[in-house]
Image (tube, grey):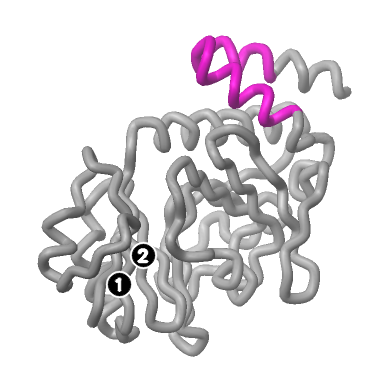
Amino acid sequence: MSVIATENFVLDKFTAINLLTADSGRRILLNDVSWKEYELFLEDFAEKAGWRLAYNEGKLEIMPPTPEHESYSFSIHDFVRAYCEQFNLNLEGRKSTTFRRDFLEKGLEPDECYYIQSAQKIIGTKIKANEFPAPDLAVEIDVTTNSLDKFPIYSALKVPEVWVFDGKKISFNKLRGKKYHQISHSFSLPLLSAEKLTEYLKLSREKGQTLALKEFRQHLNELQ
């Protein structure tokens, strides 16, 4: 198994894991990882809050949490919940649930994920970890450079909509066939535009989460 860090130097597996600390924000890419090894990594990181793993046909990316990342994740969750409350939509959030399919050799953990159109299907149900259905909406916060393209994983898992925030703006992406295409308004939350959500994420960073949420709720009132 070989390991490539985002700084582009090669490490053995054990040295790489020692470098992974939440404070560093370092992402590590491991090559030639078997499915069994991926599942062992999932077990090892199960109790590490905020850490996320993404696996695609032998490549494994390990991502630690950072304060900036968690702040944006918190704000996006607040905005999605406020929208669903405003328009009386069922919402079931599952945060960074692991979605994986061994026959596809793909798996990942979104930063946030939601069941909206299909919320009723999972409320009150017990589902095995490796059989959890794909969410209606997944969120990726990429404030640092990714070393693994996650769109092919989301596509294979048939996640209908993926939001990607790069620290400056958010894009909404809808699955059509096997490819994602940018859309101006969310499919899951139809009256919400990527442009507007970007504005409120910027406001959250500059003026604070409470003020941003308050003004976002006022914006939702104007949409009715």
The amino acid at mark 2 is: Glu
Question: In the drawing, does residue 167 fall left or right of residue 162?
Answer: left
Q: Main secondary structure of the magenta part?
A: helix
- Whether pointer 1 and pointer 2 mark residues with C-beta atoms closer than 8 Å, the reply is yes
User: From the image, which quarter does the N terminus lie in?
Assistant: bottom left
Residue where numbered disc 1 is placed: 30
- Taking the magenta stretch, the answer to whether it contains residue 33 is no
Q: Magenta region: which residues?
A: 196-216
Residue where numbered disc 2 is placed: 61
Give x and y (percent) for residue 22: 23, 43
34, above or below 47, in the image: below
Marking on residue 135:
none
Give x and y (percent) for residue 82: 64, 28
Secondary element at image label 1: strand
Question: In the drawing, does residue 47 fall left or right of residue 202?
Answer: left
Of residue 51 and residue 116, the one placed in the foreground of this image is 51
Of residue 75 and residue 146, the one placed in the foreground of this image is 146
Q: Residue at x 23, y 42 (%)?
A: 24
Res 181 → quadrant: bottom right
Question: In the drawing, does residue 83 fall left or right of residue 176?
Answer: left
24, above or below 5, in the image: above
Q: Residue at x 60, y 17 (%)?
A: 203
Q: Residue at x 59, y 67 (%)?
A: 154
The amino acid at mark 1 is: Leu
Give x and y (percent) for residue 149: 53, 65
Q: Determine the residue located farthest toward the bottom in the rendered image.
A: 103
